[in-house]
Amino acid sequence: MYFDTSGHPADARFLVVSGFIATADQWILWKQEWDEALRGEGIQVFHATDCNARQKEFDGWDEQRTSLFQRQLSEHYSAILQILDFLDYSLR
């Protein structure tokens, strides 16, 4: 099981939570596919922040290439919450 978040009430309008729940065999297959996708683009380590900003390993990428690559990598579960909605609900 793995989960990660992006976004913070102090500087973002949205909170994104993504994760994976898998068996050991599924993790092995996922890792092979992930590594192959990165290698195919010459990427050593994927950082969404760098990809979105098209900086570091993503320098020179256009918006279409970035979007297609992220869609390729995003075969997992994600939830996106508007932070103001979350704060409104959690403060009740």
Image (cartoon, rainbow, N blue to C red):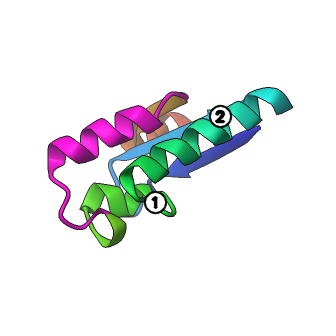
Label 2 vs 1, first from the N-terminus: 2
Report the disc number at residue 19: none
Left or right: 16 in relation to 35: left
Q: Position of residue 8 (x, y in %)?
A: 46, 57
36 is within the stretch colored magenta? no
Q: Is residue 16 left or right of residue 68?
A: right
Residue 14: image location, x then y, percent: 37, 44
The residue sitting at 46% across, 34% down in the picture is 74
The quadrant in which residue 65 appears is: top left
Secondary structure under badge 1? loop
Type of amino acid at the residue the image marks with label 2: Trp
Front one among 41 and 17: 41
Judge whether residue 61 can be spotted in this image: yes
Alpha carbon distance from label 2 to label 1: 17 Å
What residue span does the magenta drawing correspond to?
58-76
23 lies above or below 58 = above
Percent coordinates x, y for residue 41 in the rendering: 37, 52
The residue type indicated by label 1 comes to His
User: Residue beneath label 2, please?
Assistant: 30
Q: Tell me the mark number nearer the camera, choosing from 2 and 1.
A: 2
Q: Residues within 10 Å of mark 1 (few under 14, many from 20)?
A: few
Residue visible at 40% across and 33% down in the picture: 72
The residue lying at 18 percent from left, 64 percent from top is 60
Residue 81 in the image: state x and y as whole percent: 43, 35
Q: Nearer the viewer, residue 91 or 16?
A: 16
Q: How many marks?
A: 2
Circle 1 sits on which residue? 47
Residue placed furthest toward the bottom: 56
Secondary structure of the residue carrying tag 2 is helix
